[in-house]
Amino acid sequence: MSARGLTSLVAGCLFGAGLAIGGMTDPARVRGFLDLFGDWDPTLAFVMGGAVVTMALAWRIQPRMARPLLAQQFVLPQRSDLTARLAIGAALFGIGWGIAGLCPGPGFAALAIDPGAAAIFVLAMLAGMALVRLSEGAKT
């Protein structure tokens, strides 16, 4: 296995473990976090806060680096506009997250914890992604 492949494997395992330890793979906890006007569970705010701090540091460090450690160049977003497609996609993501209590990363991580329930979510998510690709292919 290459250094890049090993790094990807370690990063993926750390990400999945962090999601599990942080409670992001527990749909009941996620729905409790999203229930702002009911029985609100604030624990995931710390998980999200940790992610925000980590990315803030990364965005401060990246401009000082000539290139990434395991790639030839940085691949950063080039667009910053808000499109209807982005807004609709974000809304659908939020609705799905609220209903299922999972989003893609935690959904895949949950396959190791509760495969039966997580598989339903992951299969539905993949079907939705396929439908979007098919509908976009039909437009062109």
Image (cartoon, grey):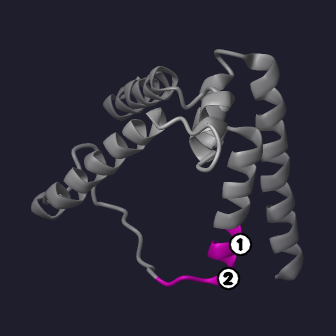
Q: Is residue 87 magenta?
A: yes
The answer to which quarter of the image holds residue 11 is top left
Q: Is residue 116 above or below residue 134?
A: above
- Residue located farthest toward the left when viewing the structure as drawn: 64
Asked where in the image residue 94 lies, by quadrant, the reply is: bottom right
Image quarter (top left, top right, bottom left or bottom right) of the N terminus: top left
Residue 57 against residue 137 in the figure, above or below: above
Left or right of residue 137: residue 35: left
Q: Is residue 96 above or below residue 73?
A: above
Residue closest to the eye, 32 or 104: 32
- Contact (Cβ within 8 Å) of mark 1 with mark 2: yes
Q: Residue at x 13, y 60 (%)?
A: 66
Mark sitting on residue 64: none
Local secondary structure at mark 1: helix
Residue 86 lies, in percent from the top left, at: 63, 74
Task: Please name the amino acid that badge 2 sits on.
Answer: Ala
The percent coordinates of residue 116 (x first, y second) are 81, 19
Q: Residues within 10 Å of mark 1 (few under 14, many from 20)?
A: few
Which residue is nearer to you in this view: 61 or 33? 33
Magenta span contains residue 99: no
Q: Which residue is mark 1?
A: 88
Using residue 53 as the reference point, say whether residue 132 is left or right of it. right
Residue 41 lies, in percent from the top left, at 53, 35
- Taking the image as drawn, is residue 108 in sight? no
Label 2: state its secondary structure.
Answer: helix
User: Which residue is at 30% across, 60% downward?
Assistant: 74
Q: Which residues are magenta?
A: 81-89
Left or right: residue 64 compared with residue 39: left
